[in-house]
Image (tube, helix red, strand yellow):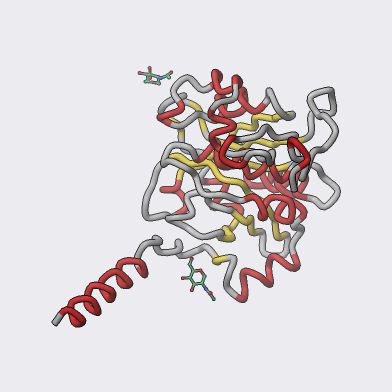
């Protein structure tokens, strides 16, 4: 009897686990599918190579902008502070950013941030272009293809509304866009709400549409942040792998 109960509760737990993620939107291609990988291999993916190793899950349901920034800052080798959790290793974490003085730009981080707030905060650390939703998908194509070209040193974070990407759970969101495929006009979105959606390719047209809806907390359209090295004294010598106290 006990064994039977154990088996059935294990089965129930497994069933629950199998349903944790939301269904992939119809027009998206999951990165981990055969097709998704093939697209990645043929696309320009410089930003994917830098960011994927540091791609992380948002710590709370309102920290999507901060989590996107953390993945990109680590991918860009922006000199990181030491989070006590990982001492003596220096690494950008969401709590590093949450305790950064620049966070003052986000007045109420518990309720997420607008694109302008996240841009203001990150401009303490890197060069930020705050790009409102472009007027056309053609304009977006130029921005994405330019930023993600192999020679570019730029990174993209999109601020979009999920409802316009056919996603089941709607609402405003941030995530890094890390690759563009010119052949099929697809963009790779690495969703920091990893408990909801896996990394997916979306038609650029859909991604563009998802940035048009007005953010009710700022009354402005959504859009993109383009992050690049500041090219000034804030960019101290790269410290990737550097540790305080010389421990290994
Ligand atoms: C891809 O990831 C999803 C979860 O997002 C998983 O359900 C699926 O089995 C994975 N596909 C492969 C081929 O492993
Ligand atoms: C946005 O617009 C609405 C309606 O016009 C207004 O009531 C509200 O105060 C505005 N919010 C901001 C942040 O400007």
Residue 99 in the image: x percent, y percent?
A: 55, 26
Viewer-side residue, 98 vs 44:
98
Please name the residue shown 63% across and 46% down the image.
137
Please name the residue shown 49% across and 54% down the image.
194
Residue 145 in the image: x percent, y percent?
A: 74, 49
* Quadrant that contains the N terminus: bottom left
Query: In the drawing, does residue 44 fall left or right of residue 110?
Result: right
Q: Quadrant of residue 103?
A: top right
Q: Quadrant of residue 158?
A: top right
Residue 211 in the image: x percent, y percent?
A: 53, 41
Q: Quadrant of residue 29?
A: bottom right
Query: In the drawing, does residue 111 fall left or right of residue 233?
Result: left
**Residue that extends furthest to the left in the rendered view of this protein:** 1
Please name the residue shown 56% across and 59% down the image.
199
Q: Is residue 234 above or below residue 135?
A: above
Query: In the drawing, does residue 35 fall left or right of residue 151?
Result: left
Q: Is residue 59 above or below residue 168?
A: above
Where ligand 2 lies, by quadrant? Answer: top left
Q: How many marks?
A: 0
Please name the residue shown 67% across and 39% down the image.
88
Residue 56 in the image: x percent, y percent?
A: 56, 49
Viewer-side residue, 91 vs 3:
3
């Amino acid at each position: 009897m006990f064994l039977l109960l154990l088996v059935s509760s294990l089965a129930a737990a497994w069933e629950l686990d199998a349903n944790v993620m939301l269904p992939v939107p119809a027009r998206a291609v999951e990165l981990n599918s055969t097709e998704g990988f093939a697209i990645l291999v043929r696309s320009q993916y410089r930003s994917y190579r830098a960011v994927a190793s540091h791609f992380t899950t948002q710590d709370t349901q309102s920290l999507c902008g901060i989590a996107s920034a953390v993945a990109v800052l680590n991918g860009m080798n922006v000199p990181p502070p030491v989070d006590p959790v990982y001492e003596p290793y220096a690494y950008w974490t969401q709590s590093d950013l949450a305790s950064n003085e620049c966070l003052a730009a986000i007045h109420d981080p518990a309720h997420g941030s607008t694109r302008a707030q996240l841009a203001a905060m990150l401009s303490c650390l890197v060069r930020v272009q705050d790009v409102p939703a472009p007027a056309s998908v053609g304009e977006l194509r130029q921005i994405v293809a330019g930023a993600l070209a192999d020679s570019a040193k730029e990174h993209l974070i999109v601020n979009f509304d999920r409802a316009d990407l056919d996603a089941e759970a709607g609402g405003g969101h941030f995530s890094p866009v890390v690759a563009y495929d010119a052949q099929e006009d697809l963009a790779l979105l690495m969703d920091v709400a990893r408990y909801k959606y896996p990394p997916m390719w979306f038609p650029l047209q859909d991604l563009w549409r998802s940035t048009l809806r007005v953010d009710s907390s700022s009354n402005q359209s959504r859009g993109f942040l383009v992050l690049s090295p500041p090219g000034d004294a804030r960019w101290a010598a790269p410290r990737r792998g550097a540790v305080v106290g010389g421990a290994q």
